[in-house]
Image (cartoon, rainbow, N blue to C red):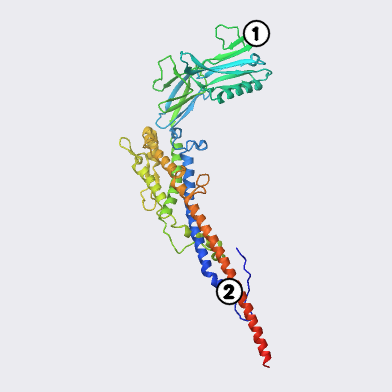
């Protein structure tokens, strides 16, 4: 801003130039203040939008985002968070269990004859040290035109490699280079490790279960001793030593409930390809073998954790819906406009704060984006009904009947919800989690479309930190236009002010000359 040369008053006139110029500039300063207030109102609207985005993004992350591992215990979409039966195990080293919604309590006897395990080859370092020509072969599930299985083959030079870490590094580097090549369509995915206690390199398949035995092998061409060794050997019996090999195997498990019902015939075991087994809503985790001593599991109904999680969600959800409702229904009072710097000088901090709160009221009244969102939420919880299973109200979740003051907020009937989880868990799961009709699934989609996706209208309008529209959004553009206008107006104001002071300075000179002439004339007539 140009600094004008100020003259405090006209010579002998008694006129206060500063006051006069200030009065003359008042209309122009008022115009600048008006544009500033207009800009500040846009900023307030942007802040109010962003407040809603922040709130509901946090709600989505905590209760609906499956990619947020930090919030897995509170996620309302995960079946595991609807555990309604707690199991105690007589030997957790062998088996543990948890019951999700719809499972039954009671006692179970578990006999684990064998754990599921991956295909494993342990090879002594002595068989690999300093070997120049080592070939690792991993069969794929592909066949060539002649019907022969296609192998993924990696050659490794272990010359000068004697330590486990050096040998492991060389093998991993060779596999990495193989996988990087575009010509190698069938990538190698194996677990390679070094055991210091076993003094061996271990190669493991990624998956357990008999069907996942692929028959990988390691061939060592010992050129010094003129000997070729293959591990595991192609022929049995073999004279090769320094290795152990085990095919992938199924878990062999017998599960019997208190009524004598079992997953297999008496005296037999059922095969499972993994150590996590799901039967009738109960998830069994096999941790070891029972060695002829069956383990007892005792399940008791417990809906507390599930209900507590839903209650916490409802409290947070209601608070955010209440904020949205206030934004939509608060009346705009045009008497309250953003304060100018001059106005703030005469006010206390608390008064300024109260004034600013009044300015915010009504800025998003009847906003189309937030109105649409609230109506979608209302629709979710008022129409989530399955004709064969009933409605959300039947399981203890309903809209607050105080439609005027608490529109869109939820009410939980803990007794109903606990009973539904215990006696009819499948109904609860369907009403809440069904991919197409479940209330929580639909709310997840609504939250994502409104606040999370880059295409969300509210982000295009107001922007948000960490998104594509943080600066390039409709309101930020309007703010920039206002700031450009303010700059030009202030520049014009400064030039006008300078012009007025310059004119008054010239006037002072003229009046000074006139006064001198009058004085001379007066002296001449004496």
Decide: is 337 above or below 211. Answer: below
Q: In which quadrant of the rendered view does residue 488 lie?
A: bottom right
Indicate which disc, 1 or 2, sits on the residue closer to the N terminus.
2
Find residue 30 and report its horizontal and vertical position in percent. 51, 67
Number of labels in the image equals: 2
Q: Nearer the viewer, residue 105 or 165?
A: 165
Q: Which residue is mark 2?
A: 19
Q: Nearer the viewer, residue 197 or 340?
A: 340
Quarter of the image with the C terminus is bottom right
Find residue 71 and report its horizontal and vertical position in percent. 50, 38
Task: Give the residue furthest to the left.
Answer: 387
Q: In which quadrant of the rendered view does residue 154 lie?
A: top right
* In-image side of 106 versus 467 (left or right): left
Mark 1 in CB contact with mark 2 (< 8 angstroms):
no
Q: Nearer the viewer, residue 443 or 486?
A: 486
Kind of element beneath mark 2: helix
Find residue 512 and report its horizontal and vertical position in percent. 65, 80
Decide: is 410 above or below 117. Answer: below
Give the residue displayed 45% in from the left and 48% down from the top. 458
* In-image side of 170 versus 333 (left or right): right
What's the mark number on residue 226? 1
Q: Is residue 488 visible?
A: yes
Q: In which quadrant of the rendered view does residue 432 lie?
A: top left
């Amino acid at each position: 801003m140009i600094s004008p040369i100020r003259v405090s008053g006209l010579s002998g006139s008694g006129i206060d130039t500063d006051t006069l110029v200030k009065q003359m500039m008042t209309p122009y300063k008022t115009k600048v203040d008006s544009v500033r207030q207009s800009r500040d109102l846009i900023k307030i609207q942007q802040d109010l939008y962003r407040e809603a985005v922040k709130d509901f993004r946090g709600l989505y992350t905590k209760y609906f985002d499956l990619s947020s591992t930090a919030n897995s215990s509170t996620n309302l979409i995960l079946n595991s968070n609807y555990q309604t039966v707690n199991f105690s195990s007589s030997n957790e080293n062998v088996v543990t269990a948890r019951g999700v919604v719809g499972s039954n309590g009671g006692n179970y006897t578990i006999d684990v004859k064998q754990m599921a395990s991956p295909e494993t080859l342990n090879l002594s370092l002595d068989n690999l040290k300093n070997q120049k020509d080592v070939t690792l072969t991993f069969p794929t599930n592909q066949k060539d035109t002649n019907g022969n299985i296609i192998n993924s083959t990696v050659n490794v030079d272990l010359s000068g490699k004697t330590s486990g870490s050096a040998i492991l590094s060389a093998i991993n580097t060779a596999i990495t280079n193989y996988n990087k090549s575009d010509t190698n369509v069938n990538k190698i995915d194996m677990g390679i490790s070094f055991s210091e206690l076993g003094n061996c390199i271990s190669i493991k398949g990624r998956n357990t279960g008999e069907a996942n035995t692929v028959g990988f092998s390691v061939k060592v061409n010992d050129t010094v001793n003129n000997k070729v060794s293959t591990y595991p050997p192609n022929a049995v019996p073999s004279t090769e030593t320094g290795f152990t090999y085990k095919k992938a195997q199924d878990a062999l498990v017998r599960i019997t409930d208190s009524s004598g019902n079992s997953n297999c015939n008496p005296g037999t075991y059922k095969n499972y390809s993994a150590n996590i087994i799901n039967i009738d809503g109960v998830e069994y985790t096999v941790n070891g073998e029972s060695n002829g001593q069956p383990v007892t599991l005792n399940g008791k109904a417990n809906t507390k954790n599930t209900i507590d999680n839903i209650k916490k969600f409802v409290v947070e959800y209601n608070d955010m819906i209440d904020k949205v409702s206030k934004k939509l229904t608060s009346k705009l009072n045009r008497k309250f406009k953003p304060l100018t710097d001059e106005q703030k000088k005469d006010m206390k901090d608390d008064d300024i704060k109260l004034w600013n709160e009044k300015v915010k009221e009504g800025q998003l009244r009847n906003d189309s984006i937030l109105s649409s969102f609230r109506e979608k939420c209302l629709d979710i919880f008022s129409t989530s009904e399955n004709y064969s299973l009933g409605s959300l109200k039947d399981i203890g979740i309903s809209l607050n009947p105080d439609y005027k003051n608490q529109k869109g907020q939820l009410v939980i009937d803990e007794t109903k919800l606990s009973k539904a989880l215990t006696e009819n868990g499948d109904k609860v799961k369907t009403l809440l989690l069904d991919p197409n009709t479940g209330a929580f699934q639909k709310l997840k989609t609504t939250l994502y479309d409104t606040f999370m996706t880059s295409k969300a209208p509210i982000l295009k309008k107001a922007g948000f930190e960490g998104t594509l529209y943080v600066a390039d959004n409709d309101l930020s553009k309007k703010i920039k236009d206002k700031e450009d206008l303010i700059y030009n107006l202030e520049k014009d104001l400064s030039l006008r002010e300078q012009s007025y002071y310059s004119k008054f300075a010239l006037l002072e000179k003229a009046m000074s000359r006139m006064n001198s002439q009058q004085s001379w004339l007066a002296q001449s007539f004496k």
